[in-house]
Amino acid sequence: MRIASLAMYVSPPPLAAATATLWAFLRDDLRREGLTDVPDRLDAALHHADAWLHPALLLAQTCGYPYVRDLRGKVRLVATPVYGHPGCDGADMCSFIIVRAGGPVRSLEDLRGTRAAINDPVSNSGTNLLRATIAPLNRNGRFFSSVVETGSHLASIDAVATGTADVAAIDCVTFGNTQRFDPGRVSKLRVLITTASTPGLPLITRGDASDDELLLLRGSLGRVITEPTLAEARDVLSLKDFAVLSDADYEPVAELARFAHRLGYPAIA
């Protein structure tokens, strides 16, 4: 049996329910199209990163930076969701650099010597985009006084809101979902600046998937966008479309990492 994991945007709870509804449609549609071994449910036990190179992978969502750094040539790009949140532009999306609403920070320079929170060292939205934004201001590879790894964007939001950290970069989809479904969580925060935009989080399948299987997956995703019974689920997810991007389309993600390296800022520090 194949596995499927769509675990990147499943909190707050309405998102998880809408994602499950979306998968139920995909499952039934793929089976009608003749694809075998389609799992009944999304795999909730497997960590999202462990799904990416799983030999039985049917469909998963990864992040742009892990894709260009570790996954290119090992998986196949299926499609990239197009979301409707502020900060999204087609398949591209930015991060919002957030600080506390009542704090003194008014510019990037004001962040020098503050405490940063990152969700994951290989996150595009939480680390790569933040690193590229800060890189021109670094001195001898340093800018912040300390960096804490929180494990998730929501935990980074909480760290800034409670004063454990002073700044974090949050992808615009997570920030938009939180504003909509858990507004109290971001009520004491403000957006200082937006980062550069890069292609969003792609859906992938295993590297040895056939062209026919890839076409089946893309066809079913296209019907997700037009299926009337999925209107509510699409609205909850702010899902507008799917774009088919190439490996070259994700090269700007890698270029931002190279940019920071060239400026002597290879890691958030």
Image (tube, helix red, strand yellow):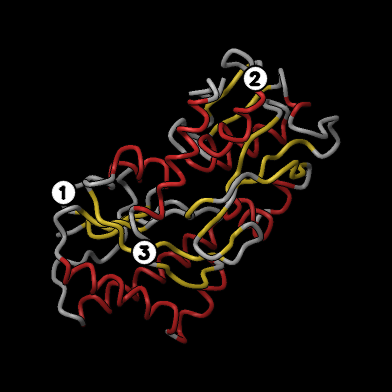
- Amino acid type of the residue tagged 3 in the rendering: Ala
98 w.r.t. 108: above or below: below
Q: Position of residue 141 (x, y in %)?
A: 56, 16
- Amino acid type of the residue tagged 1 in the rendering: Pro
Residue beneath the point at 58% across and 62% down: 89
Q: Position of residue 266 (x, y in %)?
A: 48, 23
Q: Earlier in the sequence, mark 3 or mark 1?
A: 1
Residue beneath the point at 59% across and 50% down: 94
Tell me the distance, in whole angstroms, between the alpha carbons under discs 2 and 3. Answer: 36 Å
Q: Position of residue 176 (x, y in %)?
A: 64, 56
Q: Position of residue 20 (x, y in %)?
A: 40, 66
Badge 1: residue crowd in 10 Å (few <14, some 14–19, many ≥20):
few
Q: Is residue 52 left or right of residue 134?
A: left
226 w.r.t. 100: above or below: below
**Which labelled disc corresponds to residue 79?**
3
Placement of the N terminus among the 4 image quadrants: bottom left
Foreground: disc 3 or disc 1: 3
Q: Picture quarter containing residue 78?
A: bottom left
- Amino acid type of the residue tagged 2 in the rendering: Phe
User: In this figure, which residue is indicated by the disc labeled 2?
Assistant: 143
User: In this figure, which residue is indicated by the disc labeled 1?
Assistant: 55
Foreground: disc 1 or disc 2: 2
Tell me the distance, in whole angstroms, between the alpha carbons under discs 1 and 2. Answer: 41 Å
